[in-house]
Every structure is written in structure tokens, then in C-alpha cells.
Image (spheres, rainbow, N blue to C red):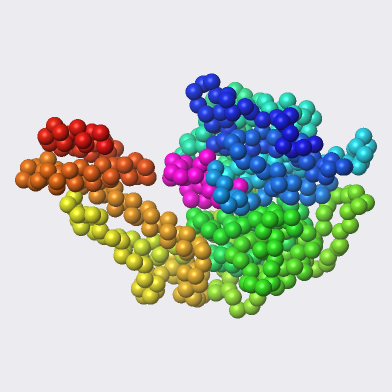
Amino acid sequence: MDPLDSSVSHRNESEGGDGRAPWARFSSWLECVCVVTFDLELGQAIEVWQLFGVFCFVLFLFLFVFPGCLGDTQFSFRLRQSVGRRGPWFGEDSYNRDAPITLQRELAHFCGYVYFRQVKDTSVKRGYFQKSLVLVSRLPYSHLFHTLLQIIAPEYFEKLEPCLEAVCNEIDQWPSPVPGLTLNLPVMGVVLQYAFFLQNLLPAPTVLPTIHEQDLFKCFQSVLIHLQMLWELMLLGEPVVVMAPSPTVSSETVLALVSSIAPLKYCCDHRPYFTIHDSEFREYTTRTQAPPNVILGVTNPFFVKTFQCWPHIVRLGELKMSGDLPKQVKVKKLAKLKTLDTKPGKIAFIFDCSWLQGIQRKRPSEVQSAILRRHLLELTQSFIIPLERYLASLMPLQRSVTPWKTPPQIRPFSQEEFMGTLEHAGPQLTSVLKGDWMGLYRRFFRSPNFDGWYRLRHREMTQKLECLHLEVVCDADLLGWTKDKSEVEIVDLILKLREKLMKARRQQLPVKEGVLEKLEGYIQTIIGSLPEDLQTVLHKH
């Protein structure tokens, strides 16, 4: 079947009679929904898709959605967006402005969520039913989307296309994701609600305590003794390969690793399920240069040799595909793959195992997972608080912000000056961890995670200065200032105030309520004090 054939189900761009853009709400959650099947003559082919906008995922999806596992398998993947393509969410995005940094919408990558089914079927020439239902989104809501797949995929495999189109229409009625709100998302007679409290709803909602977090204990239970080491590798953005027995284990482990340094954003690349068909395969497997800053989750035994030169390899279980496979599939069995390989001399800290006592006490998995998350959060906070404290000291004093001058500059970040603060205000004040904190900071300064953190915080501080400047401008006697000024000076003031107003609105600066309206009023009042000919010119521009 030609995946670009006009018979493929998609919504007409001319729809949207309620006044909003076609698929506007659908696209705030998903880029597209695809069903990929295995055709004996054509190979992998998109059988059906529901698509918003101009994105074409045909080449992408073929490469990731047939892991070969018998039965039902769920996993995630992540893809770099093609150069030159721009999605509907580029530019200023109010969602990203308000969302926690670990939940912000991806701008340069797509997140894929897959429900794959392979079962014996004598009615098929190949002898197996093989289909994948794939959700593609820019939102890193792995738990939410996999829960959604668990609801719709089995039903779709029974009823096929009409069922999928109805689901997409339901998603198009969902409210857009808004940080801080409780959202009720109805689909196929079930209401998904991700919040920590219930409302009186019929039918009763399925409550999701998280929309993105992994079960850390489940993901890390075979490598718990190495958890502190893994946290450090994530903090530094070191190249890591996770070799797993299935796409499910691979993708869950990679996503758990990425989340282990929250609330710090992991700013390197990560691929929950990486295959030899990935467009970055050559880039990531070349031996002519050092491995890139990326986490790769793999299942193919081929990668054991390919990545043997990488500095950090996490091996989980035996690399083999589970279940009864077609005779054409041959898998090389590998032994002794239950270890974590890292080059010596890389790790800075002595392992703190006090939190492991819960395992001996046989606490429930969800409790142990919560303890793990708290432990990792405390590690990250102990590390990041000294950086936050030093960065705050670079901010100009509020009294230095005046209405008659441009906002003062933030002092540059000095690594040596920061290191000098650690003796009296370092992480040893909040962490029992013993080790080379200064060495860890120096290596962190060379990592993409530091660059990402610093750029974000510097932008937030700059915006804070802009907001403070707007507020003091609005509190100043602007009209009184103009009384002894020339028309040229007054027009220059008006143009500068307009520029600040436009910038504030364009960047959606978090100014106090009423500030922008007050500034707009000042501008109009000052214009009104000028001669009529100047007023006419200024109103036109």
C-alpha cells in the first residue's frame, strides 16, 4: 500500500467550522497517529494515519516499529527533526513558558510511543499478524501516552480504522495541555485524569498520578548498586549505551536515566530505542571521533561489537528477543550480560547505600520507587543549590534599576569565583555524599547540561530585569519628564516605550498584572501632549 496514497485516512484542512484551526486541539497533544503493518511484498507500510499539518513521518516510522517480539510490546523512541522543517509550536509558546523544564514541548525532536502486536495468524501468508499503533508527539508524556495506547490499541486491532478515527476525533475535543490544571481526557468510555484529586465524573476517571515518570525501582533494580554512578554520568552528559533484552526495557531505562537528574534538564540527545536503521546510525557508530554526548537504548546484539569502544555500557539481562519467532529470525545468544561496564577512574564519589535498606525490608515497588526518586532529587538539589546561590549573586541590585537608563547587565559567570564559594557554601552542607565535589563541578562546566542550565537561567534573569525595568518605568512621572524636553526627545521616548511594550508582549514577560496596560496608557497620554501633526504621524506608526 502506498503510504502517500490519497485513500489514507486524514482530516481535510478546510474543516474547523467552529472557528478554530482544523485539528487545533489534536495537534496540541499529537503530531500524528499511525498504524504500520508488515506487507509480505512491500515490507513495512503505513496502513492508516491521522495527521495534522504537513509533517511526513513515513521514512521515520518504518525504522522503529517492528522490534520482532512476540505478543504485545510497548516502547518509546525519539527522533531528530529534519533540518529546515518547522512545526506549529516553534517560537513563543505559552505552554513551555509555564511548564516545568522536564515537561516542556520538544522543539527539535519528535517523541514516538508504540504499541506493537505480533501473534500467529494462519490466515496471513507470512503466518503472523504484525502491526504497530504509533503516537507521535512533541510532548514527553511517556506514561500518559502509553496508558492511552493500552486503551485504544487492543480495541483498534479488533475493530480497525473506524475505531481509530473516532479516537482521533475524541482527542480533538480534549482541552489543550495547561501546566497546573487538572485535565479530564475522555477516550473510548474512559476518562483519563492526571491529578492528585478526584472530581465527580461519570464514568469514574482513571487517575494518572504522573504523565511522564517511569517506575524507577522497576527500571533500576538490576543496577541499584551503581545508581550513584549512573546519576553522575547523566549529570555530566557522558556517552552511555544501554543494552537491553527488549525495546520496552531499553526505552524505559533510558527515560528513567534522563529523569534521574530532575529538576535539572538533561540537555544531551537520548534515544530510548535506537536501531541500525536510524538516520544517525553512522554518526553515532563512527570510530573516527569520540562518542557523542548521547544515551542510546539498543537491543540488537550487533551493537555489542559496534559500541565496544564506548566509555560507558549498561548491560541489562540477555540480548535476545522474547517469545516464539518466525524461522527467518535468528538471534545470537550472549552470556554474562548482567554487569555494568565503565572505565575506571571516572567516578567521583563513595557510594551511599543507606537508602537501599528498603529492599531488605521488602517494601512495595511503588514505595521503593518513590524513595529512589527522592534520593536522586536530593542528590541533584545538593549539587545545583550552590550554583543557583552563586548565580543569584550575579543579579544587579533592584535599586540599580531606574526608569531613565537601560536595565543593568548581569555579571558574567566566573567558574573560579564560584569554586571559591564551595568551602563555605558547597553541597557538603546538604549532602552526606563524600567525594570530589570540585572535580565534579569542573567536569560539569564542560558538559551540555551546564550550558543548557546556564542559558535558561540567564534568560530568566534577563527577563526578570526587563520586568523590573517596566515596573519602575510605569511608576515614574513620565509626563512630568517631558515638560522641559524637545519634541525629538519626546518622540524618542515614545518609540523606546513602544519597543519595550512590543518586546514584553512578544516574549510574554511575566510582568505584574496591569503594568502593560498602564504603559500603553502612558504612551497614549504623551502622544496626546504633542502637536496634532506629530500625533497623526505617531498614530500611523
Height in image: 82 above or below 197? Answer: below
Q: Is residue 94 magenta?
A: yes
Q: Is residue 508 magenta?
A: no
Q: Nearer the viewer, residue 152 or 81?
A: 81
In the image: residue 210, left or right of residue 274: left
> Residue 20: where, in percent of width, then height?
50, 26
> Residue 415: where, in percent of width, then height?
40, 72
Residue at x 64%, y 28% (from the top left corner) = 11
Q: Quadrant of residue 25?
A: top right
Residue at x 64%, y 35% (from the top left corner) = 51
> Residue 76: where, in percent of width, then height?
67, 48
Q: Quadrant of residue 47?
A: top right
Does the image show residue 455? yes
Residue at x 77%, y 29% (from the top left corner) = 160
Height in image: 248 above or below 519? Answer: below
- The quadrant of the picture occupied by the N terminus is top right
Q: Which residues are magenta?
A: 88-110
